[in-house]
Amino acid sequence: MYARILVPVAYEPGVDIGRELQIARALSAHGALVMLVHVMEKAPFYAIDYMPAGWQDELREAIRADLAKQASGLTQAGVAVLEGDPGRAILDFAQAEGADCIVLASHRSDTTLIGSTATRIARHATCAVHLIR
């Protein structure tokens, strides 16, 4: 059983983190902290001029509110919105927060490969990784 579980959340069409949360609950020790995390990638430089002022802050707050809503059924939960490359940001956050398990989906529809972020995390995490296909 794990005491600090990290659940990365990718906002993609049709993504439901119900499985990830179910597995995180099953792997949780009594009183465990489950942290839901989303990584915002930087907007391309050519698009910045077309974005309204404050869009990034509004998006960050909307994501934080949605993560909190999804975490509301957990006994102890935390949420974080990070910026940067998803694989690297998740690995750095997991290490900084002392996560002892990362639960994430492969986010790949074919049966032979897993996504690049999941691959990077599985290869480089210093804690346990529970990968969902």
Image (spheres, rainbow, N blue to C red):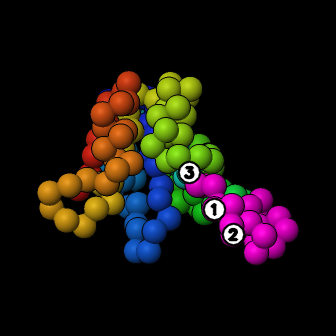
**The disc labelled 1 sits on which kind of residue?**
Pro
Three-letter amino acid code of the residue under disc 2: Ala
Rate crowding at label 3 as few (under 14), some (14 to 19) or many (20 or more) other CA atoms within 10 Å.
Answer: many
Coordinates of residue 83 in the picture (x, y in percent): 63, 47
Q: Which residue is mark 1?
A: 44
Instruction: Provide residue 13's location: percent of width, then percent of height.
Output: 44, 74
Asked if the residue under mark 1 is in contact with the one under mark 2, i.e. CB atoms within 8 Å, the reply is yes
**Compared to 63, does 78 lie above or below?**
above
Query: For numbered disc 1, what is the local secondary structure?
Result: loop
Q: Residue furthest front?
A: 46
Which of 101 and 74 lies nearest the eye of the viewer?
101
Task: Answer whether residue 120 is magenta in the image.
Answer: no
Q: Nearer the viewer, mark 3 or mark 1?
A: 1
Where residue 113 is drawn, which disc sits there?
none
Q: What segment is highlighted magenta in the picture?
A: 40-59
x 35%, y 40%: residue: 120
Q: Amino acid at mark 3?
A: Val
State the SS at label 2: helix
Above or below 111: residue 5: above
Kindly state the secondary structure of the residue where label 3 is placed.
strand
Q: How many C-alpha atoms fall within 10 Å of the one at disc 2: few (<14), some, or many (≥20)?
A: few
Q: Is residue 56 magenta?
A: yes
